[in-house]
Image: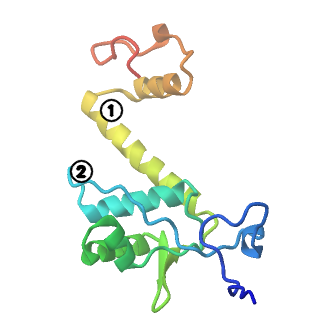
Amino acid sequence: MERSLPARPHRGLPAPGSLCILCLAQKHSDPVNPELFLSASDPRPMYQQIVDQVTAKVMAGDWAAGQPLPSIRELAAASRVSVITVRRAYEDLERAGVIATRQGKGSVVAERADLPTVLMHEELQRQLAALLAIAARLGLPRSDLHFLLDQAADPTTPDTAGPAGPSAPQGNTP
């Protein structure tokens, strides 16, 4: 007599032509893929690399709100870093509102539908601050900076209407 195995949620791809009820409802709570690309040659500390990569995955929508993250120990083992390093990264991510940690339950991506948009706005603000710092070092007047932004947004803008003077970029440098 044949014995059948008890039904259990699948991990990975279901049998061809079949989807489980969780797949149909897109409600799987499987943890995210813990694969991060950490580099010892990167000048940033390992915990910061983890923070940046998790934030980027949430910002891109790759990791959805409410999706469980790997445990601190699992991520440490998968990334070959110390548990202390991952704990610090998770603490920073929680302070930033990117993840939420529940005692005994683990960490999940924060339950905010607008989180990717909020993170992108924060990244835009950081990039703008860096742009303004470089423009200040170059001594660019605001009108030249506006022209360069317009030119970057619309590459068909002719170079002849651009900034003049010694601070003007040469060639097609945006």
Q: Residue furthest front?
A: 1
Percent from the top left, x then y, of residue 115? 57, 63
User: In the displayed structure, would residue 28 be above or below residue 131?
Assistant: below
Helix, strand or loop at label 1? It is: helix
**Is residue 1 visible in the rendered structure shown here?**
yes
Q: Earlier in the sequence, mark 2 or mark 1?
A: 2
Quarter occupied by the N terminus? bottom right
Contact flag, marks 2 and 1 (Cβ < 8 Å): no
User: In the displayed structure, would residue 16 be above or below residue 155?
Assistant: below
Observer-nearest residue: 134 or 104? 104
Residue highlighted by disc 2: 42
**Is residue 89 visible in the rendered structure shown here?**
no
Q: How is the image coloured?
A: rainbow
Q: CA distance from mark 2 to mark 1?
A: 27 Å
What residue is drawn where x is 36% and y is 39%? 132
Quarter occupied by the C terminus? top left
Q: Name the kind of residue labelled 2 in the image.
A: Asp
Q: Residue furthest bottom?
A: 104
Percent from the top left, x then y, of residue 126? 40, 49
